Image (cartoon, rainbow, N blue to C red):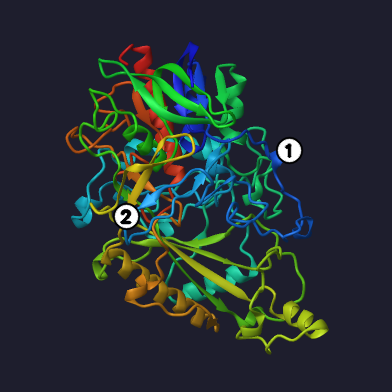
Amino acid sequence: MQVIQSTKEYDVIIVGSGAGGGMAAYVLTQAGASVALLEAGALWDVAKDGAMFKWPYDSPRRGYGGREKPFGEFDGCIGSWEMDGEPYTTATGERWDWFRARMLGGRTNHWGRISLRWGPDDFRRKSVDGLGDDWPITYDDIKPYYDNCDRFIGIFGNNHAAETGLHNEPDGIFQPPPKPRGYELLIKEACDTLKIPCVPARMSILTQPLNGRAACHYCGQCGRGCGTHSNFSSPTVLLPPAEKTGRLTVIPHAMAREVLSDDEGRATGVSYVNTTNGEETTLRGKVVVLAASACESARLLLNSTSPRFPKGLANNSGAVGKYLIDSTGTSVSGFIPKLASLPSFNEDGVGGMHLYVPWWVDNRKLDFPRGYHIEIGGGRRMPGYGFMGGIEGHPGGSGGGYGQTLKDEYRRLYGTNVGFALRGEMIPNEDSYCEIDPDVVDQWGIPVLRFHFKWSDHERKQAKHGQDTFREIIETMGGTVTTPSRDYDQDYGLEPGGRIIHESGTIRMGNDPKSSALNKYCQAHDVPNLFVCDAAPFVSQADKNLTWTILAFAWRTSEYIAEQWKKRSI
């Protein structure tokens, strides 16, 4: 098939429209650049395509999404761990689950909006415990950009660092948090007894109007796409002001195949396949920004080979694809008798937790080096597929039944379960990486990734601590643990790698071009006009979610691009 050569040259080509790509598009168009934004999926508009107010009975499957929509039929993300025509492979005996989103805004359409800024220690972990590597920047370098995100995007929470004494949980610029719900107050009461801090969550959902966006009206359906734009997503917060400049061109259904380069080693554009008709187009650009997600961006560089870059573009160090990491995850649920037989009451709130537990333990007192935070859940959320299943075995139940007896049982036990989920820090290891599979291609003929992944005892011991802690909280609440215990051979309940969808690393930043692919501004050592704005540059994880840090780094990198452009340095 003939390759279409685009006649227009853009100042910047961005691959990916999620948190990093959307932020880069916003900052660079504001700075005056003409930007082409490539999105592998379709356009998506929450007002037309979202299902914010649909009831489970509006679906013939009561909200069940199946393999194609694992978070439910009404979930605001078009994506899955398994996608037709887009395979990936794993090394024999290992497991990695890779979630891809194929829509404008990517995973920002359905994520939990948990927006935790990283702390000073998170950028210098090797200096703290001798493991992994320090970042080439400090918290002070990124703090102004966290502040920018707080002010521009909006986030609720409170400043508790002084109160709790947790110096690695930096304060921010917060809107008022919503009040805790009943089950959350019971959890906090138990945590207070155990001397575990339980504080207002930090989430990028508005509780006050901001920049023309309305405050949350507490429908609790954040994951479906917010029609009032009260929560953060790239298509509702970042892309509209970029489009308003007239300098943004969004190209959907554009699956990037290769970053093109010249004999001097400069990026010259991107080759992409139109996923609706299979046509291939070459788009020219003066600067290329990759923000396709950590693994997808690594795949793109590894597939961009040339005589100058036989191991892949910007990969003279051999670091591209290496040190793949994901957040640790394990969970425990329990039945709380105090929550049984309650009268109906208003339990409205955001689509997520109002309280959470930041990491509170001095790691020097433990047998594992890195921590985790606790996400809490429960309450009378909207019933749907799978809700209240297994009532016949419920510890507070009488064995099920049928007819009115069963209905009464559901009403009595509705909202009596609470859940605790660990989200913790994995230490990068040399056995976890991605590479190009030499034998497998996707439906467009693009070579796919092959994954290698291993947990270490550091992560297993962390998971055991979390499992023990969750059980202690439930028992302190007077409850019964309903999650079976898991031992070492079961990794203490650790979710498989990739399952938490917090993958990062693979194109790490560093000061030494021999051991890193990018410098401290996420600029390729080998290719001065190539930048990466997703989680691929991350040197390590943290005991916190990634998105707020992706946004802050993308803002910082995009400002740097604009400054260097004005100086004609790139």
The mark lying in front, picked from 2 and 1, is: 2
Taking the image as shown, residue 162 lies to the left or right of residue 354, namely left
Query: Mark 2 falls on what kind of element?
Result: loop
Pinpoint residue 133: horizontal percent, then vertical percent. Answer: 22, 47
- Residue 86 image point, x, y percent: 48, 43
Q: Secondary structure at mark 1?
A: helix
Q: Residue at x 55, y 82 (%)?
A: 479
In the foreground, 377 or 383: 383
Place of residue 180 in the rendered image (x, y in percent of width and height, measured from the top left): 61, 63
- Neighbour class for label 2 at 10 Å: few (<14), some, many (≥20)? few
Q: Looking at the picture, which amino acid does disc 2 mark?
A: Ala
Q: Which residue is mark 2?
A: 91
- Residue in the picture at 67% in, 44% down: 226
Q: Is residue 413 left or right of residue 171?
A: right
* Quadrant of residue 507 within the rendered picture: top left
Q: Are there few (<14), some (14-19), or many (20+) residues within 10 Å of tag 1?
A: few
Residue drawn at 36 percent across, 40 percent down: 536
Residue 424 visible? The answer is: yes
Which x, y percent locates residue 553?
A: 39, 36
Q: Which residue is mark 1?
A: 48
